[in-house]
Amino acid sequence: MVIFGIAGWSGSGKTTLLVKLIPALVARGLRVSTIKHAHHSFDLDTPGKDSHAHRMAGATEVLIGSAARYAIMHELRGAPEPTLDELIARLAPVDLVLVEGFKHGAHAKLEVWRTVTGKPPLWPDDPAVVAVASDGPVPGCTRPVLALDDSAAIAAFVAGRAGLAPGC
C-alpha cells in the first residue's frame, strides 16, 4: 500500500480537500482508504446502544457488523497511542492510504496552507512535504504549488507521486 499524507494546520482545509480528492482518485480506478488523526478524545459510539454498553463494561475491542459495514472500536485504556505504522497495519489492502494529520511523520505529504490560518507553512522545515496546495501565492515556496480548489490536478499529482498514475 502506498501512504500519502495531507498535512496542515487546523482550519487550513485538509478535510474539505480530502472529500474532493477521494472521489477523483477513485474515478481513476484506485482503491483508497484514509486514516484521520485526532488530537482530542473522540467517540463514535452512542450511550444507550449495546456496543457502548460492551465498551463501558470493559471490553478491549467491540466489533459492530451489518450488511452495509463494520467498525472496530479498540479501547486503549491507558496504553500508548498507536503509531501511524500500527494503524496502517490494521487496514485491509488498498492501492492508496491517505493520511490526514500526523503532520510530523516521515511519509510523503501535501501541505494544505492558507494565509487565513495565521500559521507558518510546514514545508520549510519538513523535507517530507513534496508539494503545497493553497488558495493563493506561497511566498518563497521551493516545492510545487497546486491550486487548492483544483482537486483533479491534485489527484493527478498524488497518483503520479505515488506511482499510481495510469500506465505505472
Image (cartoon, rainbow, N blue to C red):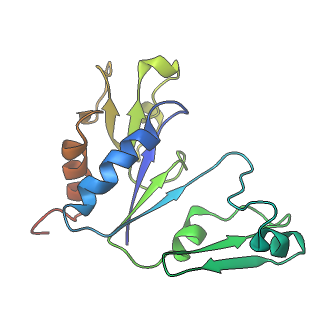
Residue that sits furthest to the front in the current view: 48
Q: Is residue 112 above or below residue 158?
A: above
Q: What residue appears at the point 19 percent right and 51 percent down from the top-left corner?
A: 156
Estimate the x, y position of residue 47 in percent, counting from the top left: 80, 60
Res 95 visible: yes
11 with respect to 140 (left or right): right
Q: As rendered, which of 31 and 103 lies closer to the eye?
A: 31
Estimate the x, y position of residue 53 in percent, counting from the top left: 84, 71
54 with respect to 64 (left or right): right
Q: Is residue 52 above or below residue 120?
A: below
Q: What residue appears at the point 24 percent right and 50 percent down from the top-left corner?
A: 155
Estimate the x, y position of residue 71 in percent, counting from the top left: 60, 73
> Where's the C terminus, which quadrant?
bottom left
Q: What residue appears at the point 53 percent right and 47 percent down from the top-left corner?
A: 101
Residue that sits furthest to the right in the current view: 57
Residue that sits furthest to the left in the current view: 167
Q: What residue appears at the point 22 percent right and 65 percent down from the top-left corner?
A: 164
> Where's the N terminus, which quadrant?
bottom left
Res 129 visible: no
Q: How many marks?
A: 0
Quarter of the image holding residue 50? bottom right
Estimate the x, y position of residue 166 in percent, counting from the top left: 12, 65
Quarter of the image holding residue 131? top left
Q: Is residue 85 above or below residue 149?
A: below
Q: As rendered, which of 111 and 76 lies closer to the eye?
A: 76
